[in-house]
């Protein structure tokens, strides 16, 4: 029913050749580029910031999907918007006011997403659906690539798909963490339409085959 979009996570790329890596996955058929921003405080790892987003922006036509794992997020929303983010996603727990963060992202002219950690209930997004362009279901605890997919999140994906359909709004339903050629079909069957894949794409020698495998088609 929904065409499936693939968003490789740059976290799993070769950091000595990031520009080439971005070009490689775009040529391989990736739809969006997923950029994981970690502050060593909201999550137990540090990745990169707006300067890298800005540096990579001219190299690609893919929408830049910025996943903020920073707290608080609000002081940095403008910096990521100006750096070239097309979509900015925030965690409700990053606080203090999810509704205000989403309003700010919208006011910056960007698409807004809400990210639900494995233990975060779907109710966290129920009263902000009017401000949301994407809901991201974490299928691992945030902070690191290469973790195992949590099957417990599949029922959450299905519930959110129902909430999105009931809203009548064009909201993307994205899954992040442990997405592989094996787990992607489970996510799609549950109602996801955007799949983030780090290790499964950047860890593969043939990126086109990897993107196709996660999407569910032949290479
Ligand atoms: C985890 C990040 C993910 C991660 C996915 O905190 O949000 O985007 O990079 O990596 P894989 O696909 O390897 O699980
Ligand atoms: Zn992510």
Image (cartoon, rainbow, N blue to C red):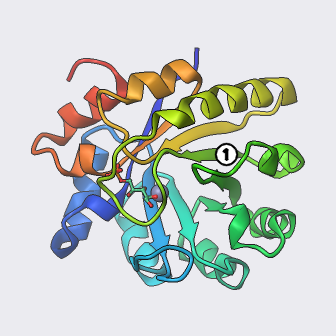
List x then y, in percent, for residue 154: 55, 30
In this view, the residue farthest toward the top is 1
SS of the residue under disc 1: strand
- Picture residue at 71% right of the left edge, 28% below the top: 159
Per the image, the residue denoted by label 1 is 134
List x then y, in percent, for residue 101: 78, 69
> In the figure, 166 relative to 145: above or below?
above
List x then y, in percent, for residue 188: 49, 24
Res 150 → quadrant: top left
- Picture residue at 54% right of the left edge, 62% below the top: 67
Q: Quadrant of ligand 1?
A: bottom left
Quarter the C terminus occupies: top left
Specify whether tag 1 is near ligand 2 (CB below 8 Å). Answer: no
> In the figure, 122 relative to 74: above or below?
above
Quarter the N terminus occupies: top right
**Pointer 1 local density, CA inside 10 Å: few below 14, some 14–19, many at least 20:** many
> In the figure, 47 relative to 159: above or below?
below
In front: 1, or 154? 154
In this view, the residue farthest toward the left is 205
Res 29 → quadrant: top left
């Amino acid at each position: 029913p929904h065409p499936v979009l693939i968003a490789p996570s740059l976290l799993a790329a070769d950091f000595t050749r990031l520009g080439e890596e971005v070009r490689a996955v775009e040529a391989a058929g990736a739809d969006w580029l997923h950029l994981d921003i970690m502050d060593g405080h909201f999550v137990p790892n540090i990745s990169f910031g707006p300067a890298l987003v800005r540096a990579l922006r001219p190299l690609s036509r893919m929408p830049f999907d910025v996943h903020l794992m920073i707290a608080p997020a609000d002081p940095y929303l403008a910096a990521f918007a100006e750096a070239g983010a097309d979509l900015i996603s925030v965690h409700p727990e990053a606080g203090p006011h999810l509704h205000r963060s989403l309003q700010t992202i919208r006011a910056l002219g960007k698409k807004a997403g809400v990210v639900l950690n494995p233990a975060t209930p779907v109710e966290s997004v129920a009263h902000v659906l009017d401000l949301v362009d994407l809901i991201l279901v974490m299928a691992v605890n945030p902070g690191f690539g290469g973790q195992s997919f949590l099957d417990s999140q599949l029922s959450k994906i299905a519930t959110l798909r129902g909430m999105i359909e009931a809203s009548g709004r064009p909201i993307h339903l994205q899954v992040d963490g442990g997405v592989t050629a094996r787990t992607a079909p489970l996510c799609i069957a549950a109602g996801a339409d955007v799949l983030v894949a780090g290790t499964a794409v950047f860890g593969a020698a043939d990126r086109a085959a990897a993107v196709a495998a996660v999407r569910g088609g032949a290479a």
